[in-house]
């Protein structure tokens, strides 16, 4: 009995290590694929940064003329934009298929992933990277470097908060895409969920009515990808970081379960594709 209790944790640890190695290999392959077209990578990288910089200029002018918006000053707004941008970018760099899942299912291309030995959900999401997302990721760090009064602890906290925020993006986007198993073509709903989550995350919490805030901490968890990280960051409140990680894992678990339930309804598309 004692030997069995020892073996089971060892197996779980080994399985976790195998998946971490798989994620590392998938990421390395995706990066190599991106770097094969360096000019395209650079154009999309700097294009996305310029796009984000345009919004920074807009907020600078707006706050200079009106003062704080929704209780946020310019530095607060810039942190939110930079933080959300980096979290959004990280999610799409590592899990580039989070907004292409429904297309893959409807085209019958999911068969390719069902034949792979790794977990279907993880394998599917990690099999692609989005080039422009690298610009989003870099933008947040550039904003943090430009904002005053941030030392090494702030940089470390920024990363510690960014990762769970990225995982929440992954969970919500993939969960919305998984609705295709139940509704057929659910691209309209999944696109709306994705756009609403991102849009609501980029504006000060105070501009949203009190009655609507429950949505921002449940169905569209903008509160956990923008507002709560801002409060933790400003207060350097490290004890709340594990709580944010726990919330992110909870959203991931729900998204994964939705996918697994939907997968039971999937009918093969009889595609003859191969993935190397």
Image: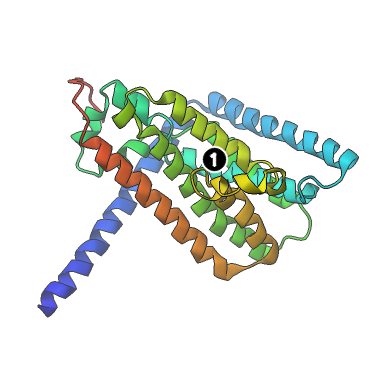
Residue 17 percent across, percent down from the top left? 29, 58
Residue 155 percent across, percent down from the top left? 64, 59
Is 99 on the left or on the right of 39, as rendered?
left
Residue at image point 45% right, 30% down: 190
Front-lying residue, 34 or 188: 188
Residue at image point 40% right, 29% down: 100
**Quarter of the figure with the N terminus:** bottom left
Residue at the extreme bottom: 2
Residue 15 percent across, percent down from the top left? 24, 57
Residue at the extreme left: 1
Give the quarter of the image for residue 230: bottom right
Q: Total number of numbered labels?
A: 1
Which residue is labeled 1 in the image?
A: 89
- Label 1, residues with CA under 10 Å away: few <14, some 14-19, many ≥20: many
Residue 125 percent across, percent down from the top left? 36, 38
Q: Does residue 134 appear in the picture of this structure?
A: no
Label 1 sits on a secondary structure element that is: helix
Residue at image point 32% right, 24% down: 184
């Amino acid at each position: 009995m004692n030997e069995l209790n020892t073996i089971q944790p060892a197996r779980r640890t080994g399985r976790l290590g195998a998946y971490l190695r798989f994620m590392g290999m998938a990421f390395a392959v995706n990066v190599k694929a991106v770097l094969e077209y360096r000019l395209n990578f650079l154009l999309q990288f700097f294009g996305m940064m310029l796009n984000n910089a345009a919004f920074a200029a807009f907020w600078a002018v707006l706050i200079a003329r009106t003062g704080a918006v929704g209780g946020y000053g310019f530095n607060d707004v810039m942190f939110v934009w930079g933080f959300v941008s980096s979290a959004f970018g990280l999610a799409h760099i590592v899990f580039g298929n989070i907004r292409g899942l429904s297309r893959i299912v409807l085209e019958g291309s999911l068969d390719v992933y069902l034949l792979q030995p790794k977990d279907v959900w993880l394998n599917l999401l990690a099999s692609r990277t989005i080039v422009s997302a690298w610009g989003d990721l870099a933008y947040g760090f550039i904003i943090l470097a430009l904002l005053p009064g941030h030392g090494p602890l702030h940089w470390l906290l920024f990363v510690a908060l960014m990762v769970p925020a990225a995982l929440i993006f992954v969970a919500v986007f993939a969960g919305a895409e998984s609705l295709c198993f139940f509704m057929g073509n659910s691209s309209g709903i999944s696109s709306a969920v994705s756009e609403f989550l991102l849009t609501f995350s980029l504006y000060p919490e105070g501009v949203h009515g009190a009655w609507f805030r429950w949505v921002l901490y449940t169905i569209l968890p903008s509160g956990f990808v923008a507002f709560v990280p801002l409060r933790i960051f400003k207060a350097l409140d490290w004890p709340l970081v594990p709580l944010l990680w726990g919330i992110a894992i909870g959203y991931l678990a729900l998204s994964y379960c939705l996918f697994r339930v939907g997968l039971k309804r999937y009918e093969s598309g009889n595609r003859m594709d191969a993935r190397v």
